[in-house]
Amino acid sequence: MTFAIILFIITYICLLVFSRYRSQIALASALIFILSGTISPAKALASIDWNVLMMIAGTMGTVYLFTESNMPELMANKILEKMPSVKWAIVALVMFAGIISAFVDNVATVVMIAPIGLTVAKKLKISPIPIVVGIAVASNLQGAATMVGDTTAIMLAGKAKMDFLDFFFYQGKPSIFWVVQIGAVVAGLILLWIFRDQNQKIDKVATVEVTDYVPTYLLAGTIILLIFASFVHEKPEITNGVICMTMMLIGILYESLSKHDPKKEFINTIQSIDYLTLLLLGSLFVVIAAIEEVGVIEAIVNLIVKHSGHSLFAIYSTVLWGSTLISAFVDNIPYVAAMLPVVAGISSYMQIDPTILYFGLLSGATLGGNILPIGSSAGIAAIGILRKSGNEPSTKDFMRISVPCALSAVTAAYIVIWLIWS
């Protein structure tokens, strides 16, 4: 365990300091864990969430076709036309991403909406970094709002036996969806304050013509199929990934048959996939599985429970804020998987309804991932998209937006959940 903790700390320090080489660092760490015998090759391979990787790859390909059709530029124009100033345009786009992310996986949302953010930034002649980071933060925030918004929400639904509508009203009370919306409003106000100096008016923008509507239909079809898939309880774990990959392949086939240079279209679409981001995520899945294998996460959980005593308020506070802190550094999927049975055990021991602790766990683990660029898959995807567009965001650039938004949203959720469910 000592070796695993030391290597884990070194890995994450290097990820923060040497941000340009995150993929290589994570891969090296994963290989060290495997070669040292901390985790077996079979378990390392099994720990990789292929569904997430397939969703990212498939959606990136479809989004490339979507972007090439000029549709993002048209959507950017529509947003700009209705906004009185730059700051309102930025906040509107970020909130738009959050709304979509409530019903679609947050990583897929970032990959879909970030190109629009890049286009808006280009039109306004400002840095795209705060816009794309804001999109990632909003996407991650709203991922807890519905059962289909994030993997952790799906995990909670399975453990608590909640269905889609339970995320709106549960046991006759407002559920997690409304908690997240209050947090989103608070975060939106924070964004308005951050961009308070961006009061310049938006000039009338040129009209843009969409060259091909098929990629838009494919992207909309991806969203609709992902939503429908959420209602199917007995389905393969890679269902969402297969949906995204299938829609991308349909797009590639269509473009190859309808364009003058099919080979070029095929190559361009395949090259649009950010393979370094996929490598980073895959490697991090192995790293997290390795420290979980030797009991590091379990030890942290036991420490939290031990020092909370028998006070519901103390336990609730520890679960929510502890989850917020841990999820800033650790991918929230394995953390939530480890914590769900612990929360259930605490509730059973204290003979209380586990809902307040479940919601506290989900809020902290989801929103806490916003604090650092490596704390969530959405953040990692956003960094990858920015790099691919020629921008190199630092950890400071990311945290300038993420920290105030995350902490304000967590605080709002902390208060609202306690008032409703205590």
Image: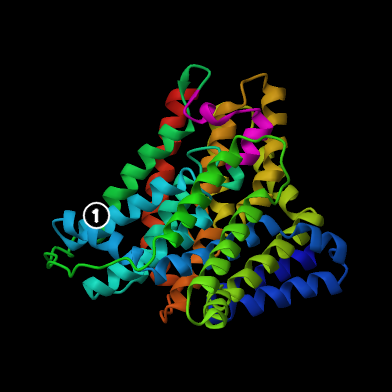
Q: Nearer the viewer, residue 247 or 240?
A: 247
- Residue at 15% x, 60% y is 85
Quarter occupied by residue 339: top right
Q: For this view, does 346 lie left or right of residue 270?
A: right
Q: Secondary structure at mark 1?
A: helix
Residue 275 drawn in magenta: no
Residue 71 position, x and y percent, is 35, 63
User: Is residue 307 in sight in this rendering?
Assistant: no
Q: Which residue is mark 1?
A: 192
Q: Is residue 391 above or below residue 191?
A: below
Determine if residue 178 is in view. Answer: yes
- Identity of the residue drawn at 65% across and 36% down: 232
Q: Nearest the camera: 371 or 99?
A: 99
The residue at 47%/65% (across/down) is: 63
Q: Answer whether residue 165 is magenta in the image.
A: yes
Q: Which residues are magenta?
A: 153-169
- The amino acid pointed to by label 1 is Leu
Seen in the picture, residue 310 relative to 360 is either above or below; the reply is above
Q: Position of residue 213 (x, y in %)?
A: 39, 60
